[in-house]
Image: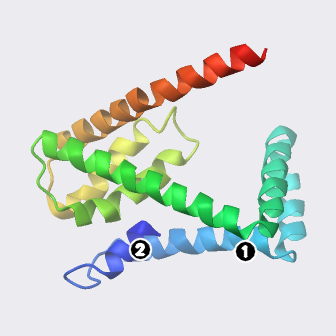
Amino acid sequence: SIAVIATLVSPGGVQSNILPVLIGILGLLLAFFSIIVFQGPGPVLRGILKRVLPERIFDVLQQIYRELRALRSEPYRILLFLFISTGVQFLRILVHFLCARSIGITESFHHFLIIIPLVAVAASLPISVGGLGVREKSATVLFQEFSVEPALIVTMELLAFLAGIIAAIPGGLYFTLVREKRD
């Protein structure tokens, strides 16, 4: 959503080749959420997924589905989650932008608003460990439109990945310590 909005309010108008990809991803997300919100498509999709997915993965997806359906009765909580997740994604974009600046990439923040959400979607695909490799390649391809040197993009992505790991350490320690106290 951030990338679509940033593309639509682009200073040069909607001239980007990225817009069809963004609209496709947004369409898939809207389809996913409509399955959760509306009762009709759920059973059909559940039947298809049950046939094609391993039982363990299907059970996990079914549990996620139940949890998300339970949120329907709590619209304020949904809005809170959307607000928090938008903030987290904006911070992810800001980290990438600052890492880029630190190594001499001078692209505008606006370009990062368009590209980094797409990189995040690509990195979230379960085809690598922690998105490594996928994140760097997708960023390199997407930043080609702005003639940024591929080596700088890979460096930026690795710096941003490292920043994310460092930022997660305090939360990981807290989670570990609180868990040990409960046990």
> Dots 2 and 1: beta carbons under 8 Å?
no
Q: Of label 2 and label 1, which has the lower sequence position?
A: 2
Disc number for residue 4: 2
Between the residue at mark 2 and the residue at mark 1, the CA separation in whole angstroms equals 19 Å
Q: Which residue is mark 1?
A: 34
What residue lies at 48% left-to-right and 76% top-to-bottom? 23
User: Which image quadrant for residue 42?
Assistant: bottom right
Instruction: State the image coordinates of residue 130 (x, y, percent, origin top left).
Output: 50, 34
Residue 150 is at least partly visible in this image: no
Residue 181 versus residue 151: which sits nearer the camera? 181
Q: Which amino acid type is shown beneath numbered disc 2?
A: Val
Q: Secondary structure at mark 1?
A: helix
User: Count of labels shown?
Assistant: 2
Image-based side of 32 in relation to 102, left or right: right
Residue 25 versus residue 8: which sits nearer the camera? 8
Q: Where is the C terminus found, in terms of image quarters?
A: top right
List the single residue furthest toward the bottom: 13
Image-based side of 136 in relation to 39, left or right: left
Disc number for residue 149: none
Q: Secondary structure at mark 2?
A: helix
User: Which image quadrant for residue 70?
Assistant: bottom right
Instruction: State the image coordinates of residue 111 (x, y, percent, origin top left).
Output: 25, 64
What residue lies at 9% left-to-right and 44% top-to-bottom? 104
What residue lies at 61% left-to-right and 58% top-to-bottom? 81
Q: Which amino acid type is shown beneath numbered disc 1?
A: Ser
Instruction: State the image coordinates of residue 49 (x, y, percent, origin top left).
Output: 82, 56
